[in-house]
Image: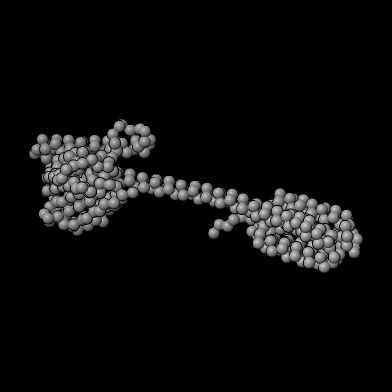
Amino acid sequence: MDRCPGPPDGPGALAVDCLLGAAVTAVVAVAITADLGGSRGPDVTAYLFAAGLGALMVVRRPFPLLALAATATGVVAYHIADFPPIGLAIPLAAALFSAAEAGRARIAVVTSAVLLAVSSFFRLREGEDVGYLLGYELASSVGVMAAAIALGDAVRARRRWRWESRRRALSAAVEREREAESRVAAERLRIARDLHDVLGHTIAVVSLQADVAAEALADDPASARSALGAIRSASDDASRELRATLGLLRDPAEGDGRSPMPGLDQLGRVVTSVSDGGLTVRTRVEGTPRPLPLVVETTALRVVQEALTNVLRHADARHAEVVVRHEETAVWVEVGDDGRGPGGGHRDGAGQGLRGMCERVGLLGGSVELGRAPSGGFLVTARLPREVVA
């Protein structure tokens, strides 16, 4: 789990801490040299206290609470030894800042309050002037300590805000990349389905017509020429659709102006391409046709195309019927035949074409049923909603 980073470290941070330690030592040494009271005057031990308080700043980043505790202990020990007074705020300020910066502001506040209370108690007991102590020095000490804690907490809050901003930006970039990959995968799947439908239908028609041409070549040249013409027509149609699809893959702005997504207006062409091979296909439109979203029209046509392709490949049928029924909220497409019925070849729904058909319709919020036709053959029934489900 991601966690907010603490204070930065490294050579630069260590140099800053060394300078801060030197400043603390210098300020405390000046206060010691001023010798404003105390039973013991400035000596080597007092200056060693000053050096020790400054040295603690070197470990304030990795061990902020240790630095605070050691500083507080050192200041208390210094005053117990009755060296010249140095106050509380200045020696503790850097340690309080470090604790708050590390997210321990509450501990810093408690430590400050305890030290101020203890120090004020003993100084008052020793006869310190109440007005000076409580009216001037205590207020200034509280102000310095509070400012140090508030500054440390503000630095931590700003660092956390920056970290959160970077984390959100990174998360958004990862999410955009995932969405882009998902769109690419969906587009690849759509193209694969289109190519399967176009090539599968065309190959089935070409194969059937080639058999017709081969059988009629010697005895019925006219039928052979008609079959070859159907092969040529099916090949041309497939080439146009493939060129349009590949043109969009290269550049959506390119192409020959023809939409790569044919609609129900080309239903007659699809039916004719299989009827020329000897399969009798009857088409019936029920209800009042109304404009449909292009993706719904394309899916409806692909259902018909895939179903008729399966009839040619697997059904061993002589007749097929295509019904397009328009209703208020949906369009129904039914394709039935009088062939071998369910279980023949891949007509149990396990084929890639039928699976792709079901996926197409399911993406629009529709449904597909596969079963036995009234004539005994195979029946494909697809329901496509007029309003596409997002």
Residue 234 visible within the image: yes
Say if 103 sits above or below 334 in the image: below
- Residue lying at the far top in this picture: please name it: 256
Relative to residue 308, is residue 49 drawn left or right? right
289 or 215, which is in the foreground? 289
| Residue at 90% from the left image edge and 63% from the top image edge | 40
Q: Position of residue 201 (x, y in %)?
A: 23, 44
| Residue at 11% from the left image edge and 40% from the top image edge | 216
- Residue lying at the far front in this picture: please name it: 131
Instruction: Locate residue 267: give its quadrant.
Output: top left
Q: Position of residue 263 (x, y in %)?
A: 24, 40
Q: Name the quadrant of the N terminus.
A: bottom right
Colour setup of the view: one colour
Number of disc labels:
0
Relative to residue 225, is residue 74 drawn left or right? right
Relative to residue 131, is residue 361 drawn left or right? left
| Residue at 82% from the left image edge and 68% from the top image edge | 125
Say if 33 sits above or below 259 in the image: below
Q: Position of residue 317 (x, y in %)?
A: 13, 50
Residue 277 visible within the image: no
337 or 20, which is in the foreground? 20
Q: Position of residue 228 (x, y in %)?
A: 17, 37
| Residue at 73% from the left image edge and 65% from the top image edge | 114
196 or 282, which is in the foreground? 282
